[in-house]
Amino acid sequence: MALKSTVYKVELSVSDMDRHYYETHKLTVAKHPSETDERLMVRLLAFALNAGESLELTKGLSTDDEPDIWQKSLSGELELWVALGLPSDKVIRQSCAKAGKVVIYAYGGRTADLWWDKVATGTSRFGNLQVFNLPEKATSELAELASRSMKLQVNIQDGEAMVSANDRMVYITPVSWKDAA
């Protein structure tokens, strides 16, 4: 018997002082059976870091040809492709060809470092690609905030994010590995 996704209800309040974006998003998030709490929370963090009026969570792990998060223009063009984890060279190449801007949030500690050592050289040709690494300690702490019904407050200033829920706070400073041209 196939396992079903677990549904999470999230009220995500974003205060992004860097981009002057202030909004609350009510999200229904399906957590794939193979998805960890850490990945779920990284997905919500990535949403907050890129939040905008037309940003959407996608089917994520259940489809190979979609990012975890995307933003489309009113006419259907893919403006922003947000991927999590450690995508292959092929996935990076295809996503950069499909979208105006691609952002990858790598995480996983030493595994992410090894992945970046392998793919970094090949990414230099993509002017529309940004790559960030999320520190392992911070993503582990984020996972501890996960619950089926969440009220998250994300404050972003000077490139640092503070995520708070239920009187607990996690500070995350994404490390830029590659900037878009």
Image: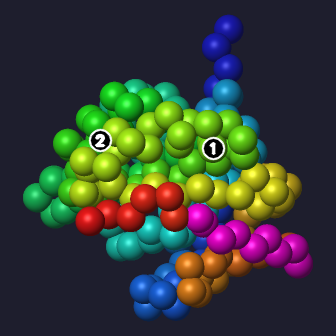
Horizontal arrangement in the rendering, residue 178 relative to residue 162 (left or right): left
Furthest-right residue in this view: 167
How many neighbours does mark 2 have within 10 angstroms: few (below 14), some (14-19), or many (20 or more)? many
The figure's colour scheme reads: rainbow
Query: Which label was assigned to residue 95?
Result: 2
Q: Position of residue 94 (x, y in %)?
A: 26, 35
Q: Secondary structure at mark 1?
A: helix
Three-letter code, disc 2: Ser
Q: Position of residue 117 (x, y in %)?
A: 54, 40
Three-letter code, disc 1: Asp
Q: Secondary structure at mark 2?
A: helix
Residue occupying image coordinates x 40% and y 27%:
64
Q: Position of residue 12 (x, y in %)?
A: 61, 71
Furthest-top residue in this view: 1
Q: Is residue 59 visible?
A: no
- The mark lying in front, picked from 1 and 2, is 1
Residue occupying image coordinates x 19% and y 62%:
73
Q: Quadrant of the C terminus?
A: bottom left
Residue occupying image coordinates x 20% and y 42%:
97
> Does the segment drawn in magenta span residue 171?
yes
Please name the residue that numbered disc 1 is placed on.
113
* Vertical order, 164 against 28 (above or below): below
**Count of labels shown?**
2
Q: Nearer the viewer, residue 55 or 113?
A: 113
Q: Is residue 166 visible?
A: yes
> Does the segment drawn in magenta span residue 17?
no
Real-space Cα separation, disc 1 to disc 2, in angstroms: 21 Å
* Vertical order, 22 against 165 (above or below): below
Tell me where residue 26 sits by quadrant: bottom right
* Residue span colored magenta: 167-175
Q: Quadrant of the N terminus?
A: top right
